[in-house]
């Protein structure tokens, strides 16, 4: 297994779209193992998307585990949101956007229904709410080339850019 470097904003590769997985073969399973290895070796990490990692052709895969003991791994391949309801407005951070410094509230659906493949290549469909729903929306955004910053108002985004400029100078 190998740890993969996490791309950092404003790396333009963070806008890459995750490539759809046709077949969950050994190569894909190795990528998933590397993603979990990276996840579990990164402090305060709730989830990672392949498009925020230093892969040459990132696949549409996300790994999630925000359990206290880091023993509830969830891997989703080609995930998509097929239904959303309600609204939440909670703070988010991102391992690719100065996670120790930048947190901002983002409008998200309170409940989502997600369809994906699991690690065995089986189609799964499930609903989630609250923190998990927020997390799923954040990760699926990554796989579509979007950061949570892209969900903020222009004014908020400009303030955050300014904050990042100052961080970069340090
Ligand atoms: Ni993120």
Image (cartoon, grey):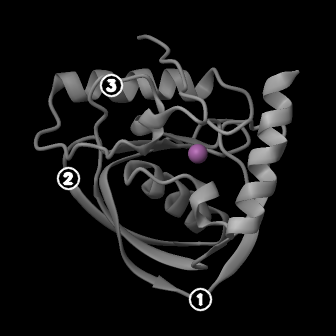
Give the residue pinned by disc 1. Answer: 86
Give the residue pinned by disc 2. Answer: 122
Give the residue pinned by disc 3. Answer: 31
Image quadrant of ligand 1 equals top right
Circle number at residue 153? none
Give the quarter of the figure containing the C terminus: top right
Place of residue 105 in the rendered image (x, y in percent of width and height, measured from the top left) = 76, 66
Asked if residue 91 can be seen in this view, the reply is no
Q: Are the residues flagged by discs 1 and 2 in contact, CB closer than 8 Å?
A: no
Give the quarter of the figure containing the N terminus: top left
| Residue drawn at 18 percent across, 23 percent down | 26
Place of residue 23 in the rendered image (x, y in percent of width and height, measured from the top left) = 11, 39
Instruction: Please tell me in which quadrant of the rendered image residue 100 appears.
Output: top right
| Residue drawn at 45 percent across, 27 percent down | 35
Q: 147 left or right of 2?
A: right
Considering the numbered disc 1 on the image, is that residue within a helix, a strand or a loop?
loop
Instruction: Please tell me in which quadrant of the rendered image residue 41 appears.
Output: top right
Is 58 placed above or below 140 here? Answer: above
| Residue drawn at 60 percent across, 66 percent down | 151
Circle nearer the N terminus (1, 2): 1
Is 11 placed above or below 83 here? Answer: above
Considering the numbered disc 2 on the image, is that residue within a helix, a strand or a loop?
loop
- Calculate the distance from the C-alpha at mark 1 to the C-alpha at mark 3: 34 Å
């Amino acid at each position: 297994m190998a740890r993969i470097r996490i791309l950092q904003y404003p790396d333009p590769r963070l806008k890459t779209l995750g490539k759809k997985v046709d077949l969950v073969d050994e190569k894909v399973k190795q990528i998933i193992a590397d993603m979990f290895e990276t996840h579990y070796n990164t402090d305060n990490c709730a989830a990672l998307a392949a498009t925020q990692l230093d892969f040459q052709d990132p696949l549409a895969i996300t790994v999630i585990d925000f359990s206290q003991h880091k023993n509830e791994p969830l891997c989703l391949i080609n995930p998509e949101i097929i239904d959303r309801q309600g609204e939440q407005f909670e703070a988010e951070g991102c391992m690719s956007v100065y996670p120790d410094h930048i947190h901002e509230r983002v409008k998200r659906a309170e409940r989502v229904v997600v369809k994906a493949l699991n690690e065995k290549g089986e189609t799964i469909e499930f609903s989630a709410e609250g923190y998990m729903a927020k997390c799923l929306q954040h990760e699926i955004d990554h796989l579509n080339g979007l950061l949570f910053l892209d969900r903020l108002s222009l004014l908020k985004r400009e303030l955050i850019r300014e904050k990042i400029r100052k961080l970069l100078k340090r």
